[in-house]
């Protein structure tokens, strides 16, 4: 079953165009959305969540149309722009006590489980948590209302290697439980460690969207590189030396 | 809507919104432009908007399973709750000054506006100005609060000057009565102000909902 279908997504800004991005994500899979800074990853994710208004295109989540069925969709998905960055001076307990009233399907047992697993202290404020712990709190909130699709914008940026490894392990655990994850990153090793599929955006255009293994083998055969990092450098690198020399 | 209002009070509100309700007691000050109390009550609400902005309240809320229109409505509802609490306090103190303290020394011969139904009417007009100029201005961007509040401050100043000057015009002395003279027409004025307050707030809310829907966050 497809949990996310994007067709011809376009967003026009004065200095940037997200141009006809199309891809889909199956249930229980992890997709990495990869590209350079400013390639259009965040715009794509924000469009999916109706935080920005697409100029054109169609977005279906769990078979429902965004933005027409926004409320129903948001009951079943979670979005985190990386670490929790709101109410930094409120206790987690207070944030959760308000958040839960918006979700009829809030699962208190699941909340307690993730709270313990992530060693989160409810009496701390987001400000007192490390970047990694704030990402985990974001995930806890999303998973406690039984989100079937997680959309995460660069969740591993700024994390130390251990926190990144823990987070990727969490992603794999969630995938095995049937949760689908779409996360943007420019850290290629993260994708090699956990992604099933990859969607590659360059300058607002989708270069490729396919299983990661196929992407790597196609590019290896074409001589573009053997690792994701090599492939990305092959596609993106411009001759800065010549530019500087001009 | 109820959930969003709970969120406003438990997460977004600044304690100063409640502290500044005490500005209603300015109603008791003799020789003072007492309508400034209404300005300060709104200043308390302004602090909640500032607090919410610093706490990324907009992002938190739009990620919840709620309509963006509901977010706007909740901000207006919170504002109205605080304003109406301030209004009730002012009304109670107005009643005291018009009855128990009507002949009290400091109030007799007060050159500035005395509490009366007309005073309460002007309070509602100042609240309406806040809802239209400040809250409506805020939702043009959902983050800029400085200029909308400056514009509201200027509008309030004009309203206070007009209100304080009116009873000096011929035939309008009754607007500043301490003895309840021509109460009927004063209550008509209060009723009209209540209608203006309600209509301005509803129209401003609907306009803000449309503006907020268009904003890319």
Image: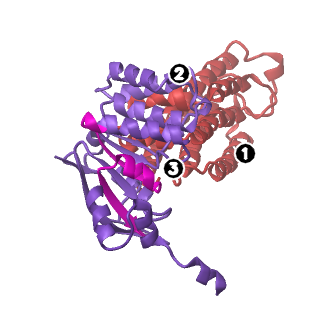
| Circle 1/circle 3 CB separation < 8 Å | no
Per the image, label 2 sits on a secondary structure element best described as loop
Task: Determine crowd level at label 3: few under 14, some 14-19, many 20+ residues with C-alpha closer than 10 A.
Answer: many
Q: Which residues are magenta?
A: A175-204
As drawn, the chain in purple is A
Q: Residue at x 33, y 39 (%)?
A: A172
Q: Which residue is mark 1?
A: B161
- Chain B: colour as depicted: red
Q: Chain of mark 1?
A: B
Task: Determine crowd level at label 1: few under 14, some 14-19, many 20+ residues with C-alpha closer than 10 A.
Answer: few
Residue A62: in sight, yes or no?
yes
Which label number is shown at residue A21? Answer: none
Q: Residue furthest left?
A: A1
Q: Which residue is mark 3?
A: B139
Per the image, label 1 sits on a secondary structure element best described as helix
Q: Which residue is mark 2?
A: A121
Percent coordinates x, y for residue B89 in the rendering: 61, 21
Q: Alpha-carbon distance for marks 1 and 3? A: 28 Å
Say which of marks 1 and 3 sits in front.
3
Q: Residue at x 25, y 46 (%)?
A: A69
In this rendering, position of residue A133 left or right of residue B101: left
In this rendering, position of residue A231 left or right of residue B163: left
Asked whether the residues under marks 3 and 2 belong to the same chain, the reply is no
Percent coordinates x, y for residue A137 in the rendering: 47, 32
Q: Classify residue A198 by image quadrant.
A: bottom left
Query: Which callout, 1 or 3, points at the residue further toward the start of the chain?
Result: 3
């Amino acid at each position: 079953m497809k949990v996310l279908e994007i067709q011809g997504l376009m967003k026009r800004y004065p200095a940037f165009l997200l141009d006809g991005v199309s891809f889909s994500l199956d249930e229980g899979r992890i997709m990495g959305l990869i590209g350079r800074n400013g390639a259009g990853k965040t715009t794509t994710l924000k469009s999916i969540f109706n935080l920005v208004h697409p100029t054109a295109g169609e977005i279906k989540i769990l078979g429902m149309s965004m933005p027409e069925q926004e409320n129903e969709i948001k009951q079943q998905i979670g979005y985190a722009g990386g670490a929790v960055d709101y109410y930094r001076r409120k206790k987690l307990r207070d944030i959760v006590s308000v958040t839960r009233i918006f979700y009829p399907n809030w699962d208190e047992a699941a909340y307690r489980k993730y709270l313990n697993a992530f060693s989160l202290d409810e009496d701390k404020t987001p400000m007192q948590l490390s970047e990694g712990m704030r990402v985990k709190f974001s995930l806890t909130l999303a998973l406690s209302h039984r989100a079937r699709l997680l959309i995460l914008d660069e969740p591993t940026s700024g994390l130390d290697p251990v926190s990144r490894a823990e987070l990727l392990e969490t992603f794999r655990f969630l995938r095995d439980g049937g949760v689908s994850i779409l996360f943007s990153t420019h850290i290629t090793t993260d994708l090699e460690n956990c992604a099933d599929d990859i969607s590659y955006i360059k300058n607002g255009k989708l270069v490729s969207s396919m299983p990661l293994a196929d992407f790597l083998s196609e590019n290896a055969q074409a001589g573009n590189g053997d690792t994701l990092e090599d492939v990305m450098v092959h596609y993106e690198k411009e001759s800065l030396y010549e530019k500087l020399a001009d | 809507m109820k959930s969003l209002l709970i969120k406003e009070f438990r997460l977004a509100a600044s304690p100063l919104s409640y502290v500044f309700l005490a500005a209603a007691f300015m109603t008791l000050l003799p020789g003072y432009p007492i309508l400034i109390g209404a300005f300060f009550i709104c200043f308390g609400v302004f602090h909640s908007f500032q607090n919410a902005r610093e706490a990324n309240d907009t992002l938190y809320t739009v990620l919840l399973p709620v309509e963006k229109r509901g977010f706007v409505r909740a901000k207006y509802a919170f504002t109205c709750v605080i304003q109406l609490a301030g209004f009730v306090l002012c009304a109670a103190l107005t009643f005291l000054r018009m009855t128990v303290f009507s002949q009290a020394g400091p109030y007799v011969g007060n050159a500035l506006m005395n509490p009366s139904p007309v005073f309460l009417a002007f309070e509602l007009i100042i609240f309406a100005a806040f809802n239209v100029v400040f809250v409506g201005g805020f939702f043009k961007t959902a983050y800029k609060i400085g200029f909308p509040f400056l514009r509201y401050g200027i509008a309030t100043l004009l309203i206070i000057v007009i209100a304080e000057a009116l009873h000096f015009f011929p035939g309008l002395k009754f607007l500043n009565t301490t003895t309840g003279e021509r109460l009927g027409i004063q209550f008509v004025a209060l009723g009209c102000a209540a209608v203006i307050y309600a209509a301005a707030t509803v129209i401003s809310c609907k306009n803000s909902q449309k503006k907020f829907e268009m904003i890319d966050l």
